[in-house]
Image (tube, rainbow, N blue to C red):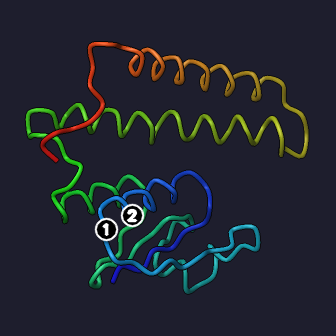
Amino acid sequence: MIDFYYNLSPNPMKVALFLEEAGLPYEAKPVDTRKGDQFSPEYLAINPNGKVPAIIDDGNVVFDSNAILLYLAEKTGRFLPAPAKRGELLSWLMFVATGVGPFSGQAVHFKHFAPERVPYAANRYMYEVKRHYGILEARLGDPHRRWHVHDC
């Protein structure tokens, strides 16, 4: 049984979707990040970065959504392309991890939650969000690509 530490933000939801689609047994363990539970000594022992998601699987502790996705994919043999396509999968996975996710989070923060308005920051992050989503839109809109994998 996998212990799955989560909240309802996008990164834990990627892991939740994988767990459900793969049919893996897990126990959902909510972490209330609004109360600061991610900084409790107990949780920091699981994820020293103090973020969700994290899993514990047969004594293996894995944190960061993309690390978890790769770990589970390799463990189950599910949702992985043929070796010749692995580089492409890793490229897009990291594109989301280092671009779409962080820029989207910062754009939301500076637009809605920053204690003071910083127009430069809000504009900069929104520009990057639009640029990254433009790249995704072009890729997903390509009629010559198929988006399901037959050999997983």
Q: What element carries label 1?
A: loop
8 on left or right of 76: right
Judge whether 40 appears above or below 143 on screen: below
| Residue 45 position within the rendered picture, expressed as x and y whole percent measured from the top left | 48, 81
Q: Which amino acid does label 1 sit on?
A: Gly
Q: Which quadrant of the structure image shows residue 121?
A: top right
Q: Residues within 10 Å of mark 2 (few under 14, many from 20)?
A: few
- For image coordinates 76% across by 74% down, the residue present is 35
Q: Mark 2 — residue? A: 20
Marks 1 and 2, how far apart in space?
5 Å
Residue at the image position 45 percent from the left and 42 percent from the top: 97
Along the viewing direction, whichever of 44 and 90 lies nearer the viewer: 90
Question: Does 13 sit left or right of 87 as displayed?
Answer: right
Q: In this view, does 70 lie to the left or right of 100?
A: left
Number of on-image labels: 2
Residue drawn at point x = 29 percent, y = 78 percent: 60
Residue 39, percent across and down? 64, 75
Residue 99 image point, x, y percent: 50, 33
**What secondary structure is marked by label 2?**
helix
What residue lies at 45% left-to-right and 62% top-to-bottom? 16
Within the image, what quadrant is residue 3 found in?
Answer: bottom left
Quarter of the picture containing the N terminus is bottom left
108 to 53, vertically: above or below: above
Residue type pointed to by label 2: Glu
Looking at the rendering, which quadrant does residue 90 occupy?
top left
Mark 1, other Cα within 10 Å: few <14 / some 14–19 / many ≥20 = few
Is 41 located above or below residue 23 in the figure?
below
Q: Position of residue 64 (x, y in %)?
A: 43, 59
Say which of 21 and 3 sits in front. 21
From the image, tell me which residue sits under label 1: 23
Q: Do the residues labelled 1 and 2 touch (CB within 8 Å)?
A: yes
Q: Residue 150 carries which label?
A: none
